[in-house]
Image (cartoon, coloured by chain):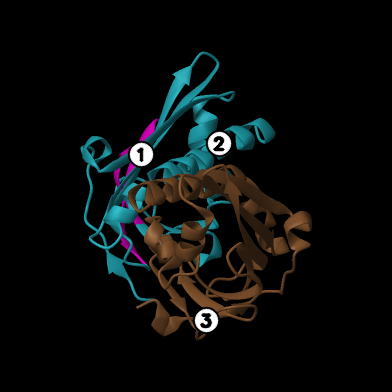
Amino acid sequence: MARWYPLGAGDESFFTTAPHVYRYTMHLPVPPARVWESLTSAHSVADWTPLLKSIEWTSDLGLGATRTVVLPLGALTFHEYFFRWDDGSRFSFYAVEANRPLLRRFAEDYLVEADGAGTRFTWTFALEGNRMSGPTLKATNAVNAALFRRIAHGAKGYFAANP
Amino acid sequence: MLQTMTRWHSLEPADAGTFGTASQVYRFPIRLRVPPARVWESLASDESLAAWGLGVRRLTWTSPRPFGVGTNREVVLPLGFMTVREHFFRWDEGSGYSFYVEAANRPGLRQFAEDYVVEPDGDGALLTWTIAIEPKRRLAPVMKVLGPVDKVAFGQFATGAKKYFAKNP
């Protein structure tokens, strides 16, 4: 009974040109390989925060990988497509479709870099609303920023507890 | 579009005590440069909060006027995130009201209530807005993490109210 709404493709430039770009950089006290291992594990970043209900890889990992992500309350489900995959250091996806007609485009970029004995981790969210949601996304910008920040910073708690 | 597949989830009733006991209570005193009567007029108007530019998608009073205790309202929250059916259990004409949510189209909430108090404050009004949330156990970790986000969200409401009455005195 699920109905799917297509989203537009994104590319690297979308992370600078999207109407809403939220970027969070943090230091994690674990080596980059550990962060990458978690990013590419079965539950990926859903292990980091209760704000992502579930993540399921639906293909082999690597460029072109696909993933299904479900938000709490079933508020939103995305099918994602990885258009960049630099093993060990970076991957990016754009959402191909969602179960609600909320966004025109949605993409995320995950960057893992060495930082002393730990990792400098940068998580970027980029989104573009549609005719219906555009004005609201603007009005709720501060809230969305707080929400994405909360999601991203789940990494700190996770790696503190699971080094 | 969302409405066609709406499934309603019941919440438990709340009362005045809920604003002291719920696991999450947010209280915002908002000073407004209009008389209390103007604030009340807006709160009880057809559009009510939907006029305040907060992204409320739709607000429908589902009871006939005159409104009072027992009045019902249906509200579609910003981005259609959730639709709630509200039941007013306190109505003090001119000075405030409280409702609890009877049903929502998403699961996860055990209780949800809001309280609005309008008082004179110099030559303006003091609107005190209180939100009480009791999530279901399953959702408690999510709500806990969302605390700071909720604070920002509800804080935006205060800003929206100030802007609205500055523009529409």
* Residue A49 in view, yes or no: no
Instruction: Give x and y (percent) for residue B18.
Output: 75, 62
Which chain is disc 3 placed on? Answer: B
Residue at position x 31%, y 59% in the image: A133
Label annotation for residue B168: none
Specify whether residue A130 is painted magenta: no
User: Label for residue B7?
Assistant: 3
The magenta-colored residue range is A80-98
Instruction: Look at 59% across and 23% down and name the residue there.
Output: A29
Decide which of A89, B38 is in the foreground and name it: B38
What residue is shown with label 1?
Answer: A91
Q: Secondary structure at mark 3?
A: loop
The answer to whether mark 2 and mark 3 are in CB contact below 8 A is: no
Q: Which colour is chain B painted?
A: brown
- Residue type at numbered disc 2: Ala
Using the image, determine if residue A142 lies above or below residue A2: above
Disc 3 vs disc 1: Cβ atoms closer than 8 Å?
Answer: no
In the image: residue B132, left or right of residue A79: right
Looking at marks 1 and 2 on the same chain, the residue that comes earlier in the sequence is marked by 1
Specify the chain shown as cyan.
Answer: A
The reply to whether the magenta stretch includes residue A83 is yes
